Image (cartoon, rainbow, N blue to C red):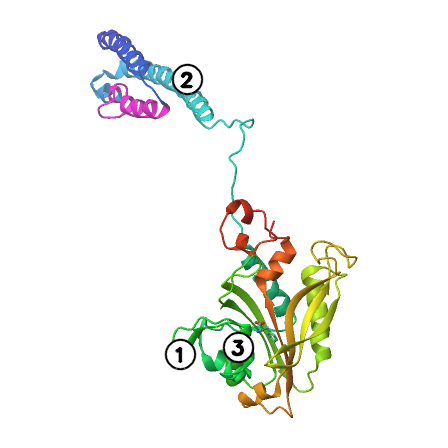
Amino acid sequence: MQELSALNERLVAIKKEIEEGSANLENSRAVYEYKKNVMDGKSGLIGSLMKGMKDIPKESRGDYGKLVNELKTWAQALFDELDVALKAKEMDAKYASEKIDITMPAEENVSGNLHPITQMRNQLIDIFASMGFDVFEGTEIENDYYNFTALNTPADHPARDMQDTFYLSPEFLLRTQTSAGQIHVMEAQKPPIKIVSPGKVFRSDDDATHSPMFTQLEGLVVDKGITLCDLKGMLDLFVQRIFGEEVKTRLRPSYFPFTEPSVEVDCSCFSCGGTGCKLCKGTGWIEVLGAGVVNKKVLENCGIDSDEYSGFAFGIGIERAAMLKYGINNIKHLFESDLRVLSQLNDND
Ligand code: PHE
């Protein structure tokens, strides 16, 4: 019996120690660690009590075990309670830290847009690609032969004056027209040919509607039996796609050394529908591109039999198309990188 009264005293002391020890625990993890220590079979305050069992006389062992078990149950309940309380506190803290104020104004998501020239170029390529055209990328530096001579514009030809050229050397120049690409394509490829070729071109020219560097998209179709009617049909479809369903085209006689006949292509004004407005300068028509039937001499220069094959070509000024489409009155807006202007010109929204 002596052992039991000594045990009772121990149990009171252990309870006190556990109460004090657990009073300072700050989180559920600490409760878990503390409980593990207390219950530990070797060194734990409660765990080690069982080890003392062997020193207890047989007749007292039952009572001893009961007391120790009661203490265990008591401690377990204490830890459970603490665990629940601390976990609740932790959840509260977590919720508080993750709280979202749904009335807070959202951060503005500023995203850029493609440059209007790029948008227009992509739209043109999409339209022509859907008609089966391949894309050919030419080079900005050309030699005199590809930019002029092969395009039926020999050195003394007056048409050279139409395009004031930046020469890099007597032989090399900055291409004045993407038409130079026609020659590369026809030299490399036998008909049927159906390509568009977008790219920068350069001319010593500078006013409200002209820039020394601008962008063109060339088109070339060569096959058996191609006529001006094929060009007209394709252009009708093209202007409808780019400017609107109701837009029509008309051809006016023009001159380019590399096409015969040559035409200037107008489309009916998509702003007023043809009755006359500021955009079409009261005429009802807007000039959109130059085109024509490929001159036989150009085909022959590229080794293509002009009796067997014929073709048409066209050249679109991409800045001009963008200015018409977006209602821009000065080409400088397209080159000044002013975001106040450029961000308004977005077809991708
Ligand atoms: N290269 C001509 C220009 O820059 C446009 C054009 C291309 C005309 C193809 C006819 C055929 O003015």
Q: Specify the principal SS of the magenta part.
A: helix
Give the secondary structure at mark 2: helix
Asked whether residue 3 is drawn in magenta, I would say no
Q: Which residues are magenta?
A: 28-49
Q: Position of residue 88 (x, y in %)?
A: 44, 21
- Left or right, residue 306 beside residue 82: right
Q: Residue at x 52, y 37 (%)?
A: 108
Left or right, residue 254 beside residue 41: right
- The disc, 3 or 2, on the residue closer to the chain's N-terminal end is 2
Label 1 beta carbon less than 8 Å to ligand 1: no
Amino acid type indicated by mark 3: Arg
Kindly identify which residue carries mark 2. 81
Q: Position of residue 38 (x, y in %)?
A: 28, 21
Front residue of 321/72: it is 321
Q: Which mark identifies residue 160?
A: 3
Identified at 29% across, 14% down, the residue is 18
Residue that numbered label 1 is attached to: 170
**Pointers 1 and 2 in contact (CB under 8 A)?**
no
Amino acid type shown at disc 1 = Pro
Quarter of the figure with residue 105: top right
Q: Is residue 307 above or below residue 185?
A: below
Q: Nearer the viewer, residue 150 or 203?
A: 203
